[in-house]
Image (cartoon, rainbow, N blue to C red):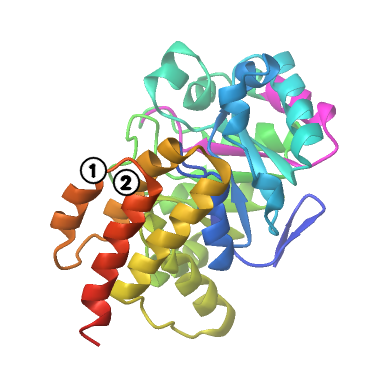
Amino acid sequence: MFKIGNIEIKNQVGLAPMAGISNASYMKICEEMGVGWAVTELISSEAVVRNNKKTLDMLKGINTLNIPVGVQIFGSNPATMAKASKILVDLYQIAFIDINMGCPVPKVAVRGQAGAGLLKDPDRIKEIVEAVVSSVKVPVTVKIRSGWDSKSINAVEVAEVCERAGASAITLHARTRSQGYSGPVDLAIIKEVKEAVTIPVIGNGDVNSIQSALEMLSFTRCDAVMIGRGALGNPWLLKEIVTYLDRGEKIVRPTAADKIMMCLRHLDYLLEIKPEKAAVLEMRSHICWYLKGLSNAQKIKNMIFQVNTAENLKKILNNYLKEFQNTV
């Protein structure tokens, strides 16, 4: 459907990087739902260079996926970003490197002068992108925001700088850093960026339905959309949008039983890449998202927070599943 550098992407729907979420287990589920590519949660370039085990463990299993996967890195030092990128490409044979210039959290953007903090320094952006591009043989993409705040909307300038520095694609979350994840998405700025550069532009922000995906694609003329929070507890959204864009068809919405069985599958995938305790702790949040709106869900949520083993968690979910299977 489009290319990131020399990499062919099969459709216009990608999985966004989400901290604590976008690991190999979640990406595997989203791959099954048909996404064209995925980007990992953000990884510290400093930690990669220091060979920090906890950081590198966040990437366990990503090279087992069958879709193009990019690792997203953050940092403010061009040399460190370049070194980290080479290490990651050599270790994981990833499809591309994605540079985070959109993270709004103070630890990254303010104190670290990385993430969205880089939007205030186009010269540093140029140095970082050039350094990373020259250090690896895979494409380099950049994820940005509209600007630091409403008084400094500079996504067009930043995108142009990134393109000249050698970036292969731009993903734009069409909110400012000061907005965080609230307030309206500015489709007009995505359109302006698309008109200003020749590399692919991927739109991001509040794509949570077929309609919102169509609106973003048609109004901005962006090459693709990237979906993050809209798919939490609802990876079927990805399949829904992919199917509609591909064939103009709508899928059957998941039943309560489908959602519970997805919880069980997701847990198994987590157990493949994490110790049992860590997998169970992470799965608790996902279960809350998956079960939202189901009958007796609150009772189940209360129960899962009382257990610490995969066996007990599966027992609770399987018993809950029987409630719905017995009503069919």
Report the residue marked by disc 2. Answer: 284
Instruction: Answer yes or no: is residue 222 visible.
Output: no
In the picture shown, does residue 9 fall above or below 245? Answer: above
Amino acid type indicated by mark 2 = Arg
Q: How many marks can you see?
A: 2
Between 24 and 11, the residue placed more toward the observer is 24
Between 141 and 193, the residue placed more toward the observer is 141
Q: Residues within 10 Å of mark 2 (few under 14, many from 20)?
A: some
Circle 1 — which element? loop
In the picture shown, does residue 153 fall above or below 65? Answer: above
The span shown in magenta is 126-149
Is-magenta flag for residue 86?
no
Amino acid type indicated by mark 1 = Phe
Q: Residue 305 shows which numbered tag?
A: 1
Q: In which quarter of the image is residue 70?
A: top right
Alpha carbons under labels 1 and 2: distance apart: 7 Å
Is-magenta flag for residue 139?
yes
